Image (cartoon, grey):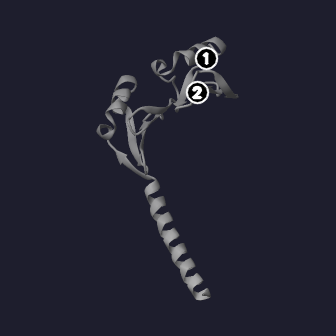
Amino acid sequence: MKKLSVILATIFISASTAFAATFHSNDSDERPITFEQLPAEAQNFIKSYFSPADISHAIIDKGILFDDYSVMFTNGDKLEFDDDGKWIEVQCRKSAVPQAIVPKQIVDYVKQYYPTATINEIKRDRNEWEVKLSGGLEFKFNSSFRLVEFDD
C-alpha cells in the first residue's frame, strides 16, 4: 500500500510539474511585430494622435485568452492596447497626452485644481481611470469620474 501511495504521488507531482511548465510557457509569449500587424483600431489611434514613422518597436504579448500590444516611440512615449486594439494606457514622457482621449470630466478637474499641469499618463480599465500629471501627482477616478484616490 505504501509503495502504491509513493507511485501515485510521483505520478501526480510529475503531471503537475509538466502542466505548470506548459501553462507557464504559454502564459506570456512576447514577440516583435510591425505596425501593420497591430489591430486596425490601434493603427487608427496611432495615425490620429502620433506618428507611425516615430515608432521604435511594437510587441505583441500573446496570452492564454487575450493578446496585448505595446508600442514604443523613439522619444520614449509608450502605448498599450488590448486584444481589439482599444488603448489601455498612454504614457508621454515630455508632452501631454492627446487631450481628445481624456474624458472631459478629468480634463475639467485638472484645469480647475492644477491649471498649469499637463496630463502625461492616462490608463483606463472597466472600473477606473488613472492619470499622472507633469508634477508627479497621480489620481484615480471611478467609472463615474469621481476622484477616489490621489498620490503626491
Q: In which quarter of the image is residue 113?
A: top right
Q: Nearer the viewer, residue 83 or 49?
A: 83
List x then y, in percent, for residue 95. 51, 24
Residue found at x 32% / y 41%? 34
Please state, as top left, top right, bottom left or bottom right, where the C terminus lies in the image: top right
List x then y, in percent, for residue 35. 32, 37
List x then y, in percent, for residue 57. 39, 41
Residue at image mark 1: 110
Residue found at x 44% / y 32%? 87
Identity, as a three-letter code, of the amino acid under mark 1: Val
Query: Sequence order check: which comes first, mark 2 or mark 1?
Result: 1
In the image, residue 66 sits, relative to residue 53, either above or below, namely below
Q: In which quarter of the image is residue 120?
A: top right
Identity, as a three-letter code, of the amino acid under mark 2: Val
Please state, as top left, top right, bottom left or bottom right, where the N terminus lies in the image: bottom right
Say few, some or many: other residues with alpha carbon within 10 Å of mark 2 (under 14 / 14 to 19 / 20 or more). many
Asked whether, in this view, residue 33 is left or right of residue 100, the answer is left
* Element on which disc 2 rests: strand
Residue found at x 52% / y 32%? 126
